[in-house]
Structure formats: structure tokens, C-alpha cells
Image (tube, rainbow, N blue to C red):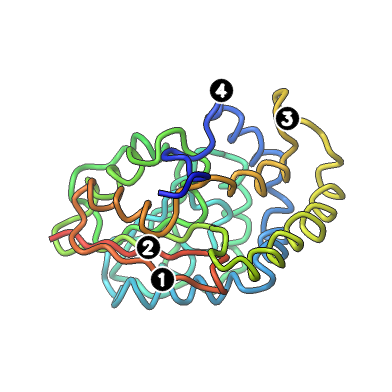
Amino acid sequence: MSEETKPNGTQFEGKKDYVKDVFTEIAEDYDEMNDVMSMGMIQGWHRFMMKKAGSLNGKRCLDIGTGTGEIAFLLSKGAGTDGEVIGADITPRMLEIAEMKMKERDLLKPVIFEVGDALDLAYEDGSFNVVTSGYMLRNVTNIQKAVDEMFRVLAPGGVAVVAELSKPNNKVIRYFYELYMKHRVARLGRKQDKGKVIDGKYSAYEWLTSSVEGFPHGKEMMLKFQKAGFSDPRFYVKSLGAVNIYVGKKK
């Protein structure tokens, strides 16, 4: 594990409430800023996630930390009328945005959006065939517990597909990545959040960018998937290391 990696990411007292307040604050601008922070590549990451999830037709799927529902909508298109998709998130305002967006989506069957905590999912053991999560793990207070919960709610033969931001390992690529994050993203973020500090900690977009610092990724994250019980978990480096996509299967 590299010296800068923190086994459980960035943690502080009151993080759960802080994260909820952050995403309440930025819900209306979340999709736009995701596109900026990903340099326009986020839709490609989501398509790759669906590819790794395999056939979704008729499957029961859960998107944890669903936010404004983008991944859940893709799951719903694949699951069809015989499947079911639930999108769970700790922030009610994000779910309200997802519900509004869904009215404009051509879905064969609506997504069920529910308030839910990634560390204490209100679903029975083995009740889903597919579990997904996008950019959520940096925001939880216990990464291992979140991965454990994904494994618990998966049925045997099920698959978890998780996308999370990371920092490129290549020093040259990392240099330009950090320039982009510190200047382009930081400036746009400041326009959105006006530098308003939330709960006496970070402004909203300061958190979204700084939370990547020290976050375990790659092989370190794979150890957490293995510990949870996933068989032969793998990760895929996308966009020169800007994001990792983790895939774990339950025997």
C-alpha cells in the first residue's frame, strides 16, 4: 500500500451527516459537474459497467448511492419489464431529482427509488442478482462495511460492479490530472458552491475533489472485495487512471 493511501479513505467526525448535507446542497448541479469532473467520459464509464454486469434481462438489480439515477436508468433498460431495479441513496433531495428525471426517460418499467444507507441496507440476504454503485465509496464512513453489504444482498451467482474515482499512477499523467482537478474543476466548483463551507468543514466541491486524496484504489480496494467474500474480484483502469471499475462475483 502506498504511503499516501488511507485504508478507509478520508474520515472525520460527523461525516455521514456532512455528506448528506453536501449532496442536498448540490443536487440540482450534480449531473453537470459530474460531466465536468469526468472530462465528459462518465457515460462511457457507465456503459462499461453495464457490459461487465452481463445480461440484465429479468434480473433484480440494486444501485447503491444512486444519486440522480443515471446508473439505475441504464439497469432498468437492460432489466426490462420482467426485471426490477431499486435505486437507494441516503439523500432524499437526490432521489427527488432522480424521480423528476425519470418522467422524461423512456423506461419500460420505472425504477423504485428509496432512501437507504449503504452501510445498513434494508434488504434480505441474497435478494439481488446485480448490485452497482458509482462514486459512492469515498463518501461512506466504513468502506469495508459497504462492500460487505453489497456481498450480503447479492444472490449466489450475482455480480457487483462498482465505479470509483482514483488518481493516475503514472507521474506524467497524474501531473496533468491534478492540474485539471485543481484549476478547471476547482474554478467551476467554486462558481457553483460559492465557496460556502458546509457543517464547518469543506465546501461541496472541495469535498468532491479532495475526497480522492488518499482513497484506496486498485489492488488495495481488491483486498476489501476479497475480504467481503467475492471470488476472483477484478478491477479495470479507465481514462488513464481517472476511474477504476471493480467487478466481484458471488459464488
Residue at image mark 2: 246
Q: Quadrant of residue 200?
A: top right
Is there a contact, CB below 8 Å, between mark 2 and mark 1?
A: yes
- Which marked residue is nearer to the observer: mark 1 or mark 3? 1
Q: Quadrant of the C terminus?
A: bottom left
Is there a contact, CB below 8 Å, between mark 3 and mark 2?
A: no
Q: CA distance from mark 3 to mark 2?
A: 31 Å
Residue at image mark 4: 14
Label 3: state its secondary structure. Answer: loop
Q: Residue at x 27, y 67 (%)?
A: 59
Q: CA distance from mark 2 to mark 1?
A: 6 Å
Q: CA distance from mark 2 to mark 4?
A: 28 Å
Q: Which numbered marker is on residue 198?
A: 3
Q: Quadrant of residue 241?
A: bottom right
User: Disc 3 marks which amino acid?
Assistant: Ile
Q: CA distance from mark 1 to mark 3?
A: 34 Å
Q: CA distance from mark 4 to mark 3?
A: 12 Å
Q: Earlier in the sequence, mark 1 or mark 4?
A: 4
